[in-house]
Amino acid sequence: MTDRAGTYAQDSDLIDPEAVTAAYYDLVPDVADPSQKVVFGTSGHRGSSLDAAFNEAHIAAITQAIVEYRTGQGITGPLFIGRDTHVLSAPAERTALEVLAGNGVTVLADAEGGYVPTPVVSHAILVYNNDPSHDDQADGIVVTPSHNPPRDGGFKYNPPHGGPADSDATSWIANRANEIIAAGSGDVRRGEAAPGRHDFLRGYVDDLANVIDFDAVKKAGVRIGADPLGGASVEYWAAIRDTYGLDLTVLNPEVDPTWRFMTLDWDEKIRMDPSSASVMASVVSRKDEFDIVTGNDADADRHGIVTPDGGLMNPNHYLAVAIDYLYAHRPDWRPDAAIGKTLVSSSIIDRVADDLGRRLWEVPVGFKWFVPGLVDGSVAFGGEESAGASFLRRDGSVWTTDKDGIILALLASEILAVTGKSPSALYRGLTERFGDPVYQRVDAAASKEQKARLGKLSGDDITATELAGDPIVAKLSEAPGNGAAVGGVKVVTEKAWFAARPSGTEDVYKIYAESFEGPEHLKRVQEEAKTIVDAALGA
């Protein structure tokens, strides 16, 4: 934590939007340089135009590759496209529209030319594909780097299942895009952008009553403050208020590509992460004015929940409360519908699931793993420790297969309205029943070679038998829920666990750890975790 974390941005922190946009067009990436290649992470290709990592050549090539991919997959329906409020999102969308037009793809963009949150694109794809009046299938593109700083751009592909593309698809698209750029981009076809128009906002907002009990929220008179943090959800919150007659105030309707109104994150960077106490400092300062205050990141796939009695909730804490509430208040969900969590999410979720008599479905990091279960209703809730989650409609059918920070934010008000208790108070009740875990993520130095070894490590490579004085009961390199490789290891005792995964962007590995025995025990777990992992890596 730095001295200026949680304080308002100063002029010296701000980007020059014109310079960032000019670099998008002027700089041509050299894909022989790994830092300038197309690389799809868990949420698409991200980078800054200023670093020659997100430029017109990238987006043109990625879009051409997506066209070729969807053709190979027999996808012939419309492609829904939306963008967030980052300065690079508008030029990138324009490039994509030209390439899609040049390839004869039917495209549906926002009817008002406005911003479109990630979950809204997922919702539109699923609604179209679940309509029996046609046989073709739609897919989509979301132009967003999510919560990343203002200088960054992002570009991700959602296939017909509506969620993030799997690694087979993204690897093919990235490899093909790099081939196109390396060959001089001659394979890119471009035309005049002339997309069809789709009313994303009304289609999503009018359907929300099938997910959230607005009658209960309105009847209880819950006073809501919703801060879009300068992101794509800004018009959606006003529309939700007006459509459902809620006592809801949009705390900051301003959109500014510099995000000058933000408070700085832990590293003094402007970042729209609603789970960060530093980022949410100005939002938290208004907690006593409302019953529930919420925040969303720039594409609204993440949520932050603030209560008068608890301040900003830890994402793991809110996930546990949401799960406990939903599975008790959604009678039309399948009785065998599992609870989905990533393996680095809190183990209090395991205890809640056991108490509910529900199967826990634990998967690797990445929301894509929840997609099949959300589609067929076998997983009613999927959540990540990084404040991303989605859940089913009230009738048990699919809502979105990408993270939806809007419905998670609205759910907090429903929980308060129905139970009479804030999510923070309900979490305290859970800890009285199941224990009070302490959770933290730290980083440890690692070379590229060590990171590569860690990503391929097997549980059998861990020779330790104890962790912080307790017997190790599991050493996992595959997720229990689906058997997929976790890209690292997780070591579990009855009282604690840690997971180690290589960073995709830095020469470090991430250690996630949790203890039900308090902060000192957690510190011991973290110290021994590093020793155990370093021994397995031969460090």
Image (tube, grey):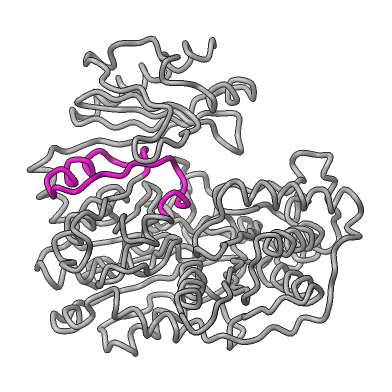
Q: Which residues are magenta?
A: 342-370
What x and y, as percent, mark residue 6? 43, 53
Q: Quadrant where the N terminus lies?
A: top left
Residue at the location (27% across, 53% down)?
319
Residue at the location (66% across, 68% down)?
89
Residue 231 visible in the shown view: no
In the image, residue 533 above or below residue 496: above
Residue at the location (78% across, 63% down)?
60
What x and y, as percent, mark residue 244? 29, 87
In the image, residue 233 above or below residue 374: below
Q: Quadrant where the C terminus lies?
A: top right
Query: Is residue 355 rendered magenta in the image?
Result: yes
Quadrant housing residue 363: top left
What x and y, as percent, mark residue 309? 17, 59
In the image, residue 75 above or below residue 146: below
Viewer-proximal residue among 382 and 397: 397
In the image, residue 23 above or below residue 51: below
Q: Is residue 510 left or right of residue 92?
A: left
Quadrant housing residue 362: top left
Residue 64 visible in the shown view: yes
What x and y, as percent, mark residue 340? 32, 49
Viewer-proximal residue among 493 and 86: 493
Viewer-proximal residue among 58 and 54: 58
Query: Is residue 310 rendered magenta in the image?
Result: no
Residue at the location (77% across, 81% down)?
193
Q: Is residue 398 left or right of residue 537?
A: left
- Report the number of discs: 0
